[in-house]
Image (spheres, helix red, strand yellow):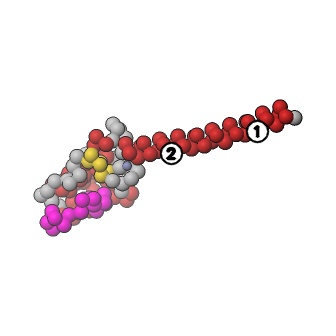
Amino acid sequence: MGAAELSDDPGVAEMIQWIADRYDMNKADLARMFQTTQSTIHYWIRTGRISYRNLRKLRSSYYYLHNTRDPHGDERKCDECGQWRRLPRFRVGKAICRECENAKTLQHYRENRESELRRRKAKNWYNRSATAG
Ligand SMILES: [Zn+2]
């Protein structure tokens, strides 16, 4: 398979399986290769859930063994929008990009404001009826 036909975003299980099949590696070999435990390898395969750091390792091995480079080597996939974005688009330690973070903050602000307005309206109504009464 040439680099041209390689997916730029293969699944975690797919990459591990490919490495295992191609190099005849069992889970113990894979665990050694990724400096982790066999149960972690099993977890990655079963759930596709993997830390950003380990995904970097897995992807660089996968593409290296295909004689090419990770097409998203200097990027990170946003947990929220699923887009690959350059690292500066993420705040340190954040798994969602700044755009998504901003959108969430804005949404949170709007929701807060709406409930605040509702609360104020109820309070005004109460005050008015109290003075009128
Ligand atoms: Zn995003």
Say if residue 57 shows up in the picture. no
Amino acid identity at mark 2: Gln
Q: Secondary structure at mark 1?
A: helix
Residue 34 has which mark? none
Going 15% across and 63% down the picture, which residue do you hit? 3
Q: Is residue 24 above or below residue 130?
A: below
Marks 1 and 2, Cα distance to the nearest angstrom?
Answer: 27 Å
> What are the residue bounds of the magenta stretch?
1-16
List x then y, in percent, for residue 122: 72, 40
- Residue 21, quarter of the rendered image: bottom left
Front one among 102 and 55: 102
Q: Within 8 Å of ligand 1, the CB of disc 1?
A: no
List x then y, in percent, for residue 49: 37, 53
Please, which residue is most extreme toward the right here? Answer: 133
List x then y, in percent, for residue 31: 26, 51
Q: Is residue 122 above or below residue 131?
A: below
Residue at the spot of label 1: 125
Residue at the spot of label 2: 107
Q: Secondary structure at mark 2?
A: helix
Q: Earlier in the sequence, mark 1 or mark 2?
A: 2
